Image (cartoon, rainbow, N blue to C red):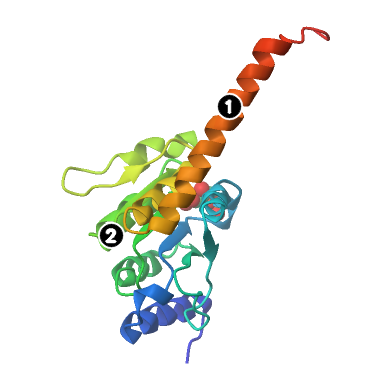
Amino acid sequence: MSETPRQTLRERLEAEARADVDPAVTPDVGIVMGSSSDLPVMREAHRALEEVGFFEQSTIDEPPAADRRTYETFVISAHRTPELMMTYGQTAARRGLALIIAGAGGKSADLPTMLASVAFPLPVIGVPVDEAALGSVIGNPTGAPIVAVDAGKAYNAGLAAAQVIGASDPEIRARLTEFHAAQAATVAAESLQLHEGGVDLSGL
Ligand code: RP5
């Protein structure tokens, strides 16, 4: 019987890994962050994934419809819950995840880099939640790879994760292509409007 949320979480992760469930019905992308205070930045990764066709999955007992891609979310601290970080990383592949987005902030933002080592060979996309975290998130030694986005760019981490999944999923690839075209159209429309309408200098 579990006594603490930390034990409950570890036992759940280990049970899911042992269950050997078809990866088609488990989350594809794991989004983890060092603190709930990282959520305002990290939820941009969720937003990007939703925009290209992913949705959130909280339990393997409620599997997605066929062909739907999903993500899950956890708060895991490398320093405050190191054993939970180890369990998450060690069970990630067996739980059916294809990759992990990991964010942390501050000068000791060790969650992304440590998870990259523990979950290897699953790819980890690191998000420095703030500028102070940049060096510690991108600074893994040779042989312990991590890919990372710039400080605060969790949205790009979501898109990059979708690109990885899209390499073998035509539906996600099509959604990414639509997203890209819509973005280009918006920039072009803004450019035309600015060029033809001129710059409004009133109020300066
Ligand atoms: C890091 O410390 C977390 O990722 C967060 O960015 C930072 C501060 O955490 P809290 O003190 O807000 O929980 O580990």
Helix, strand or loop for disc 2:
loop
Helix, strand or loop for disc 1:
helix
- Residue under numbered circle 1: 187
How many numbered callouts? 2
Q: What is the CA distance from the residue labelled 1 to the residue labelled 2?
A: 35 Å
Task: Identify the residue at the far left of this view.
Answer: 143
Residue 37 at what x, y percent from top left?
Answer: 59, 52
Residue 9 at what x, y percent from top left?
Answer: 46, 76
- How dense is the environment of label 2, judged by Cα within 10 Å: few (below 14), some, or many (20 and up)? some
- Residue under numbered circle 2: 122
Residue 124 at what x, y percent from top left?
Answer: 33, 53
Query: Would you say residue 134 is visible in this rendering?
Result: yes
Relative to 67, does residue 17 appear above or below in the rendering?
below
Which amino acid lies under the numbered mark 1 shown in the image of this protein? Val
- At x 51%, y 37%, the residue is 181
Give the foreground label among 1 and 2. Answer: 1
Q: Nearer the viewer, residue 56 or 136?
A: 56
Q: Is residue 4 left or right of residue 203?
A: left
Q: Within 8 Å: ligand 1 and the Cβ of disc 2?
A: no
Task: Identify the residue at the far right of this view.
Answer: 203
- At x 47%, y 79%, the residue is 60
